[in-house]
Amino acid sequence: MMNPIPIRTRTRLDVTYSLHPADEPVSQFWVVLHHGICHTREQFRKLIAALNALGLNVVMIDQQSETAADRNWITIQQYRDGMAEALQQLQEKHRDISIGCYALHSMGALIGELLQSTYPQYRRPTVLMTPLPPWLGAFPITVRLLLGRFKDYVSAVRTFDIGSLARTSEQVNAIFFDRNATSESLAEVVGKLKHASFLSYVQLVLPWPARPWRWDNRLPKLLLTSPADRIFKPWEYWLVRLRSSQITRAMIGGGHDFFIPHAEWTAGQIFTFLKRHEELSLDIEAEAARLNYAGPHFAQQPDHAIENVGDDQQHGEH
C-alpha cells in the first residue's frame, strides 16, 4: 500500500491518490474509487482490502475542502477537474497502470459522470454506489431533513456546515446506515467525516445545471443500491434506465454506506463487473492512446471520438 500522493491542481481542493496493489493480481486493470460527500479514503479501507483479497488492484482518489480558502464556494465542476488531474498525473507517473473501471459513491458518482462527459479519454465502465438519482438529486432528502430535523437543518444552512447533521453515533446511524448497523461500522464514520463545500451541496440538491442532461456514454454501468438507504430511496432511481442504456442493478441492506458493513459483497460485485468488461476497457484504452488524448486540457475538444468504441463488444445486461 502506498501513502497518499498529493498533487497540485487548478482547484482549491486538497487532492491525493493512493495505490493499493493486490498481492496476486488477477487482472491487468485497476479499479478507481472515489468517495461521496463528507467522506474520505478512511471509509473505504475495508472495501479496498476486500478488493485486494480478490486480486484486484485499486486506486483511491480523495478530494477534500477542509483547509481550502473560500471552501464553501467550491463547485462540483472543481471536484471533476481535480479528479481529472489526479488521473492525468497517475497515468504520467505510473505508465503501467491501466484503468479498468470506476466504483463511485454518492457525490463521487456525479463527479465521475461529469468527468467522463467532459474528458472522453477517461470513460470506462462504471459502478455507481448509491449515486444521486437522476434529476431528483438530493432534493427529496433535503425535504425530509427539513421536515424531520428542522432546527438542525436550519443551523446547518446558517453555518454552511452540512456535516453538522451527522456528528453523533445516532445521527450517523440515522443517515448513513440501517437499523442493523454495528458499532464497528459506525466507528468507520463517526468523528471521521470532513467538511463539504456548501455550494457543492446546493448543486446536489438542484443537480440539473451541474450534470449532463440525459447524457449516456453507452458504456456498461452497475447500479448498487440499498432498500434501507435513508438518503436516496429506491423509488427515486426509477428514471435511471432512461439515462443509461447499458445498466444492471443489484441491491443489499446496510443503508447508504452499505459498502462498509458489506465490503466483501460489494467487492464481489465490482470484481464480476470488471472481469465481464475487461475486453471493452482494453478497446477504450487502445482507442484513447491512438487518438493521443493527453489530459484535462482536452476539455474543450469534441467528445464524440470514443463515444461508440466497443459498442459491438459490450456485454452489459439490459
Image (cartoon, rainbow, N blue to C red):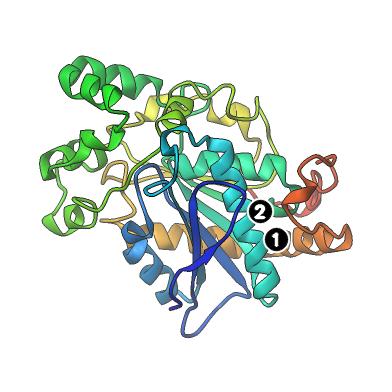
Image position of 137 with respect to 267: above or below: above
Residue displayed at 59% across by 44% down: 80
Res 20 label? none
Residue 268, image quadrant:
bottom left
Cα distance between the residues tagged 2 and 1: 6 Å
Residue 199, image quadrant:
top left
In percent of width and height, residue 186 lies at 18, 52
**Quarter occupied by the C terminus:** top right
Residue at the front extreme, as displayed: 69
Residue displayed at 41% across by 45% down: 36
Closer to the chain start, of discs 2 and 1, is 2
Please name whichever residue, 108 or 283, is drawn nearer the observer in this view of the structure: 108
Q: How many marks?
A: 2
Residue displayed at 32% across by 60% down: 42
Residue type indicated by callout 1: Ser
Q: What SS does tag 1 mark?
A: helix
Circles 2 and 1: CB distance less than 8 Å?
yes
Q: Residues within 10 Å of mark 1 (few under 14, many from 20)?
A: many
In percent of width and height, residue 62 lies at 46, 56
Residue displayed at 72% across by 46% down: 119
Residue position marked by numbered label 1 in the rendering:
281
Image position of 20 with respect to 260: above or below: below
Q: Quick check: can you spot residue 185?
A: yes
Q: What SS does tag 2 mark?
A: loop
In percent of width and height, residue 231 lies at 32, 32
Q: Quick check: can you spot residue 247?
A: no
Image position of 240 with respect to 221: above or below: above
Residue position marked by numbered label 2 in the rendering:
124
Q: Residues within 10 Å of mark 2 (few under 14, many from 20)?
A: many
Please name whichever residue, 106 or 217, is drawn nearer the observer in this view of the structure: 106
Please name whichever residue, 309 or 82, is drawn nearer the observer in this view of the structure: 82
Residue type indicated by callout 2: Arg
